[in-house]
Image: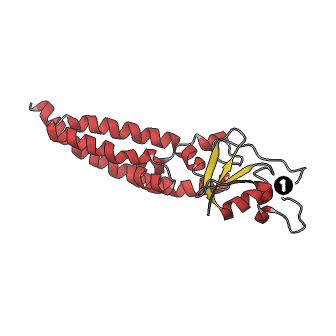
Amino acid sequence: MQLYVVMPDGQRYGPVTAEVLRNWAAERRVLPDTWIENAQTGERVLARQIPGLMAAGGETLFAAEANPLRVVDGGPAQVEQETLTAFSYGAMGLPFFWGIAHRNWKPLMCVPIGFLGSVLTFFHPLGAIVQAVLVWTFCIAWGRRGMRWAWQSGRFASQAQLEATQRKWNNWGIVGITIQLCFTLLSLLPAVSWFFNP
């Protein structure tokens, strides 16, 4: 089952699995009166009405003295701003795969952008320059937003989990960036040749 955490301002976080929701409940990352929405049916219930989120003695896990963590652009957890603004080499170097893994369609735009650049290159050698500018501009933009998007995906229950996963993506992303750079340089050869021998 996939669930959304709905905040008082109407912002939804997720969808997340019931297991992730239980982890958030155990760590007091949502409040008793937080609405939980079923992603399939749209039905909403209060967090305190979900039996799996209650302690054995019937007392809610969200104790009155609990210190709820603030929401920072992604889910009911505390994440340092420095982490959210860190550069994501995974989102930059492997945008297609990164986008699918994090349920974000924006990096998937690499496909139509690449196709458009190829069409321009087919009609004129200088199209390769336009393609390189488009591709690298968008890849850098995705890299700058990657960590924030990753957190907003709802896949991570804590900052530590977010950072650990993104470190692996960053390692592979650097490989992807290197491959992209090689292809870009090769694609620019016809444009350079045309420039010096029009």
Q: Residue at x 58, y 58 (%)?
A: 40
| Number of numbered labels in the structure image | 1
Residue 37: x and y in percent read 66, 53
Specify the quadrant that holds the N terminus. Answer: bottom right
Q: Residue at x 69, y 38 (%)?
A: 9
The single residue placed furthest to the bottom in the displayed view is: 56
* Direction from residue 163 to residue 169 in the image, left or right: left
* Direction from residue 81 to residue 115 in the image, left or right: left
Q: Residue at x 39, y 53 (%)?
A: 176
Residue 141: x and y in percent read 45, 38
Specify the quadrant that holds the C terminus. Answer: top left
The secondary structure type at the circle numbered 1 is loop
| Residue 61 picture quarter | bottom right
Q: Label 1 neighbourhood size at 10 Å, few (<14), some (14-19), many (20+)? A: many
Residue of label 1: 62
Amino acid at dot 1:
Phe
Residue 35: x and y in percent read 72, 50
* Direction from residue 153 to residue 190 in the image, left or right: left
Picture layout, residue 122 above or below residue 27: above
* Direction from residue 3 to residue 101 in the image, left or right: left
Residue 124: x and y in percent read 15, 36
Q: Nearer the viewer, residue 117 or 35?
A: 35
Q: Nearer the viewer, residue 38 or 178?
A: 38
Q: Residue at x 79, y 49 (%)?
A: 31
